[in-house]
Amino acid sequence: MFSVATPVITVFTLTGPQDRLRQIARERAYRTCAPEQMTWEDETTLVMTLESGIGTSFLGHGLGLSDEYPDVSIRGMEYFDCFDDPGFAKWQGGELVYEADLITVFGILFPTDATKDWPGCSASFWHRSPPLTAAIAENCPDFDLMPLRKLVGPAPGWVQTSDGFATLFLRLPSTPDTQDGLGVIFYPGIGRSTLVTGIDRFGGAARFRRQAYGQISAQCPELRAVLRDCWKADEKKRRKARQEQKVLRMRLKKAEQERGDNVFSFFDTDSWVM
């Protein structure tokens, strides 16, 4: 049996006097990472990048650096294979200031400028935690949902985008400091929808809950017309999905009977569960 390693990228950003950072760079060469994986962001910021893991835990390695160099500020970031669920941490004066795992529940791209290589604003929603705001503000300073206000949406205060499978309707926070944004993630092809409440400018959300199309329409009457259009547009696709699920359930039930056990009962026959 072959196993495939998941690429792991770990980045430590050290901030302090340039002479001190140069000394640290010499001491950590080939210990933390190779010299060519150390870069200078500016005169007082040294960035060390470690690929494919570091042989110990992300927090453990950061704590070791912080113990050895308590006179510099250290920010750490680690992610596996992609940037969807990064982990962030910060050490100051030898102490852990914050540690935050940004668990992405939903992410989608808003196309805002077709002339740019990255023609959009990524709207991602995470389970909010106390360190979330500090972690995003320091490590992803350009991530902010508020600029989406300039887009024209389906109803006053709302913006909309789709990736061909899911459609996001987003009501942005009323001010940059509030957590009263609202999101509707609508899957018209399968007839599913999720309501996201308590959204802040950084995508942190208080709650995610599955709701029926009718419930969403009742709670967001200003979206009723556009939701109805989305619902009708994919009626044939939903009917086909229901037929495919019915056939799958019948096949699993037949296989279960032939085996004489309930081994297949552990599997969810609804392949569209979010």
Image (cartoon, helix red, strand yellow):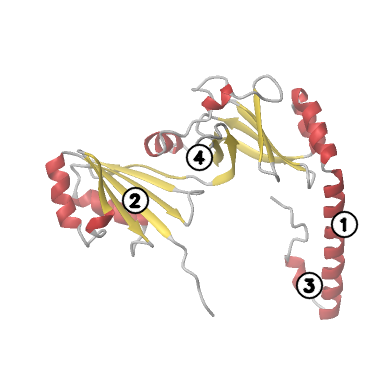
Mark 2 = which residue?
11
- Under circle 1, the secondary element is helix
Mark 1 = which residue?
243
Mark 3 = which residue?
262
Name the N-terminal-most of marks 3 and 4: 4
Residue 77, x across and y down, in percent: 38, 48
Residue 236, x across and y down, in percent: 87, 47
Bin the neighbour count of mark 3 within 10 Å (Cα to Cα): few under 14, some 14-19, many 20 and up. few
Q: Tell me what residue is drawn at x 52 percent, y 34 percent.
A: 115
* Foreground tag (3 vs 4): 4
Question: Which amino acid type is marked by label 3?
Answer: Asn
Position of residue 63 relative to residue 137, above or below, is below
Q: Which mark is residue 14?
A: none
- Residue 244 visible from this viewpoint: yes
Q: How many marks?
A: 4
Q: Quadrant of the N terminus?
A: bottom right
